[in-house]
Image (tube, rainbow, N blue to C red):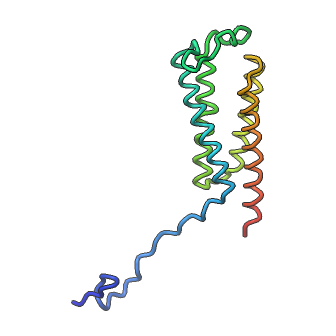
Amino acid sequence: MAIHRATKRAVGDVRPPMQRPPSRPPIPRGAKVLAAIELITGAMALVGGVLLAIRPDGSLLNANPAALRDSPFPDYRWPGILLAGLVGGGFLIVGLWVLRAGRAAAELSIVAGIGLVVFEVAERFWLGFQVLEVVFVLVGGAVIGLALRVMRSERSRP
């Protein structure tokens, strides 16, 4: 039996050539930026939350225990758990979902952005003003804005 060199198949073999499964469409640039912001924010929140939870006196992050004086928390353990779980876990999951171009990814990003803003506003009432709260409210707003932009671009595609 003769073998055709280019395809390494027997001459006369009538099977169709193997086809690759359809690939996903490329991820738009706006979605990549959105996912990057979410993944970086999620990773930072996860690490920060874990550090607060394992050393509730705040010493690993140089967090001032006096900031908890008028809060409902005796130490940083629960704030750390909430930070790691809600913000860290939530943003990491949503960021990965955006990269996978998962169903309703932009909508989930909006929910995550709103969640971050709400978390920071609650933190403001629990702990008083801190500059990082402003930074992460802006990050939450940026996530919401980028997610809305991604949604509009998805709807305008054929």
Q: Is residue 19 above or below residue 135?
A: below
Q: Nearer the viewer, residue 122 or 55?
A: 55
Tell me the residue at 62%/59% (across/down). 27
Splitting the image into 4 quarters, where does residue 114 fall?
top right
- Number of labels in the image equals 0
Instruction: Pick the quarter of the image with the N terminus.
Output: bottom left
Spot occupied by residue 133 in the image (x, y as percentages of width and height):
73, 27
Instruction: Pick the quarter of the image with the C terminus.
Output: bottom right
Tell me the residue at 60%/63% (across/down). 26
Q: Is residue 2 above or below residue 109?
A: below
In the drawing, does residue 49 fall left or right of residue 154? left
Q: Is residue 12 above or below residue 151?
A: below
In the drawing, does residue 7 fall left or right of residue 32? left
Spot occupied by residue 140 in the image (x, y as percentages of width and height):
73, 38
In the drawing, does residue 124 fall left or right of residue 63? right
Splitting the image into 4 quarters, where does residue 95 fall?
top right
Tell me the residue at 58%/27% (across/down). 48
Splitting the image into 4 quarters, where does residue 151 fall?
bottom right
Tell me the residue at 72%/34% (across/down). 115
Q: Nearer the viewer, residue 31 or 132?
A: 132
Residue closest to the far left: 1
Spot occupied by residue 129 in the image (x, y as percentages of width and height):
77, 20
Spot occupied by residue 42 in the image (x, y as percentages of width and height):
60, 37
